[in-house]
Amino acid sequence: MGEIIKEALRIITGRFQNSRAFKAVLIVLAALVVLTGVFVAYPSFRAGVLAFSGDVFYKDRPELSDVAYDDVSRTVKGTVKGVKNPGDYRVILFILTDQWYVKPDFNAVTKNGMSELQSGGRFLINAFTGDQYDNDIKATQYAVFLVTSTYEGLKHMNDFDGAKAASVCSYIDTVP
């Protein structure tokens, strides 16, 4: 049987060997066969290829997990999962009152609004810093963005769109 297949391939390739389209089809088919073998043999490779964000490949896609707004302490807490080194990431918290504001504040201490992750990828950020008008308690939504530590930080205290564009992943919810 193998000899029949080999002879059939020799005849077909001999007849079309000068055809560019045929050569292109053969190359594509060969690539598909190789990729199929890799995907079947290495399931972890398949997961890494399917999760892609920006110019960084992730074996496990980063995600914000167990994110919650505590109405009593007015803090937002959560965990970042799917990252190899939590020190390579920062979290940015915004609350929505009359517009989006970064919390806890916008200064050098938080590196222009970015908060570092604690051990195990956990974070706890004060969402209520108070102001002379008590706008913080009027918050209706909050948003958490995960960015890489190479992100230079927000341009101003309500740079919501900048944080969103730079984020690896995000979580947005209503304030209870």
Image (cartoon, grey):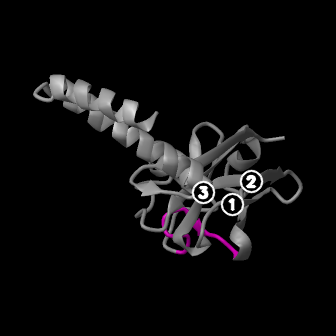
Q: Where residue 104 sits: x, y (%)?
A: 64, 62
Mark 3 closeness class: few <14, some 14–19, many ≥20 residues within 10 Å: few
Question: Circle 3 sits in a helix, a strand or a loop, which is it?
Answer: helix
Q: Give the labeled residue for mark 1.
A: 81
Name the disc covering residue 65, or none. Answer: 2
Residue 60 showing in the rendered view: no
Q: Give the labeled residue for mark 3.
A: 44
Q: Chief secondary structure of the magenta span?
A: loop
The amino acid type of the residue labelled 3 equals: Ser
Classify residue 90 as left or right of residue 153: right
Tell me the residue at 13%/24% (across/down).
19
Residue 172 showing in the rendered view: yes
Q: Are marks 2 and 1 in contact (CB under 8 Å)?
A: yes
Q: Nearer the viewer, mark 2 or mark 3?
A: 3
Q: Quadrant of the C terminus?
A: top right
- Reading the chain from its start, which is encountered first: label 1 or label 3? 3
